[in-house]
Image: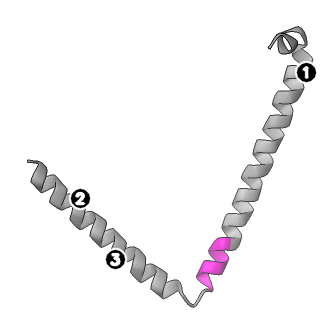
Amino acid sequence: MQALRSSPLSAAAVASVLQVVIFCCWVAGLALRQVLMQALRSSPLRSFAEAWALQLLHFLLLRSSRDHLCAH
């Protein structure tokens, strides 16, 4: 900690490198998301995934409404 206090330029350099790394990870994450979304859209399992998501959503809504009614 003392080394960082004595050389503020070094701390600024470390902070700048950290910001660059975070930004690069963010950009890579966006690119990966685009690739995965394109793969999902062209997937033959898309209809299965949508049906599964709707079933899960229905289950969660039913359960939350049931829990809400039981709490009162």
Q: Earlier in the sequence, mark 2 or mark 3?
A: 3
- Give the quarter of the image for residue 12: top right
Q: Which of marks 1 and 3 is nearer the N terminus?
A: 1
Give the magenta range: 36-42
Identify the mark at residue 55; answer none if there is no mark.
3
Q: Is mark 2 on a helix, strand or loop?
A: helix
* Gap between marks 2 and 3 measured at Cα: 14 Å
Q: Given the image, on which type of amino acid does mark 3 rest?
A: Gln
Q: Which of marks 2 and 1 is nearer the N terminus?
A: 1
Q: In this view, does 46 lie above or below 37?
A: below
Q: What element carries label 3?
A: helix
Instruction: Give x and y (percent) for residue 39.
Output: 66, 79
In the picture of the structure, the residue carrying the numbered disc 2 is 64
Residue placed at 66% from the left, 77% from the top?
38
Residue 7 is one of the magenta-drawn residues:
no
In the picture of the structure, the residue carrying the numbered disc 1 is 10
Q: Given the image, on which type of amino acid does mark 1 rest?
A: Ser
Dot 2 and dot 3 residues touching (CB under 8 Å)? no
Q: Is residue 1 left or right of residue 40?
A: right
Magenta span: chief secondary structure: helix
Q: Mark 2 Cα within 10 Å, few/some/many (few <14, many 20+)? A: few
Q: Is mark 1 on a helix, strand or loop?
A: helix
Q: In this view, does 19 lie above or below 40?
A: above
Instruction: Give x and y (percent) for residue 28.
Output: 76, 57
Residue placed at 91% from the left, 21% from the top?
10
Q: How is the image coloured?
A: one colour
